[in-house]
Image: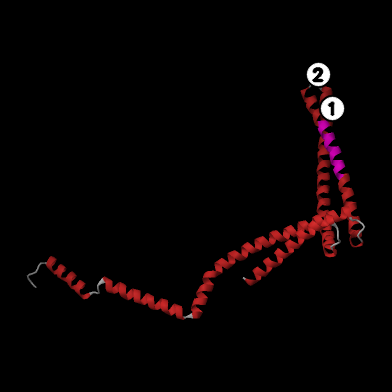
Amino acid sequence: MEGLSPSHLSLLQVAGAKQGGLPFWVFYLLLSLILLLIFINFLQNKDFRQKLSYLMARPRRRLHRLRLQVYLKKEEQKKTELLRQLGELSSLKWPDLPEIEEIASEIRALEEKNCWLQAEWHQVYRRLEILKLQKRRLLNSEAGQDKPKSNLEEIETEISSLEKTRQEIQESILTTDELLAPHHQTIGQVVYRLRPDREDLAFIYFQLDRANERIKKLKQDIEKL
């Protein structure tokens, strides 16, 4: 051994290590047996299987719940719109229904105000168009520079004032529209509860019935998750 070179010694050490170690196929066989035992234990442990299945299913249930909640919100919005349509139609075609008489009178007052505001808006709009046309003509005029300049200032002042008035009218129209919506919805709820036998309202009843069924089913499905 003393006469061997260092290179020969290293080769002998490697060979000895290979002889002393396990073959690769034995290692893989043992690993496979261990995994098999773990799998068998998993099959026999019911509680562990249920917990693992529950953990794996949680993301799917959460996603499904969110999807159902989106559908529920859409159906509730659809129901609200149908009630508004029912109330609007009822207030126009059946204003003498005792349960909605007081609300219907308030709605008629708001609608009359809305019509008056819209008429005012159109008058202001037409006046603005006339003034803007006069302003363009004055700007393009070449004769009498002093007089057109004075008229131009007056026109611009009136245009500014009318623009402000038109904006105020538009805001008032939006306000009355917002006030009308809940009134119509309230009337729709009353009429839907009473369900008077009228052909012109029957189709809205049908749509509301379907919307209520879908809302009920979606709520039940969400509670089960």
Judge left or right: residue 214 versus residue 3. Answer: right
> Front-most of 86 and 48?
86
Q: Quadrant of the N terminus?
A: bottom left
Location of residue 153 in the rendering, given as x and y in whole percent from the top left corner: 82, 30
Residue positioned 34% across, 74% down in the render: 31
Q: What range is drawn magenta here?
A: 117-131
Q: Amino acid at mark 1?
A: Asn
As helix, strand or loop, the secondary structure at mark 1 comes to: helix
Q: Which residue is mark 1?
A: 151
Q: Amino acid at mark 2?
A: Ala
Residue positioned 80% across, 55% down in the render: 85
Location of residue 75 in the rendering, given as x and y in whole percent from the top left corner: 71, 60
| Label 2 vs 1, first from the N-terminus | 2
Location of residue 2 in the rendering, given as x and y in whole percent from the top left corner: 8, 72
Judge left or right: residue 163 versus residue 49. Answer: right
State the residue lying farthest toward the top.
Answer: 143
Judge left or right: residue 93 versus residue 16. Answer: right
Query: Can the viewer see residue 158?
Result: no
> Front-most of 125 and 75?
75
Query: Can the viewer see residue 103?
Result: yes
In magenta segment, residue 125: yes
Whether residue 25 is situated above or below residue 175 in the rendered picture: below
Residue positioned 58% across, 68% down in the render: 61
Whether residue 189 is situated above or below residue 120 in the rendered picture: below
> Which SS does the magenta portion mostly show?
helix
Whether residue 196 is situated above or below residue 14 in the rendered picture: above
Q: Which residue is mark 2?
A: 143
As helix, strand or loop, the secondary structure at mark 2 comes to: loop
Quarter-of-image position of residue 214: bottom right
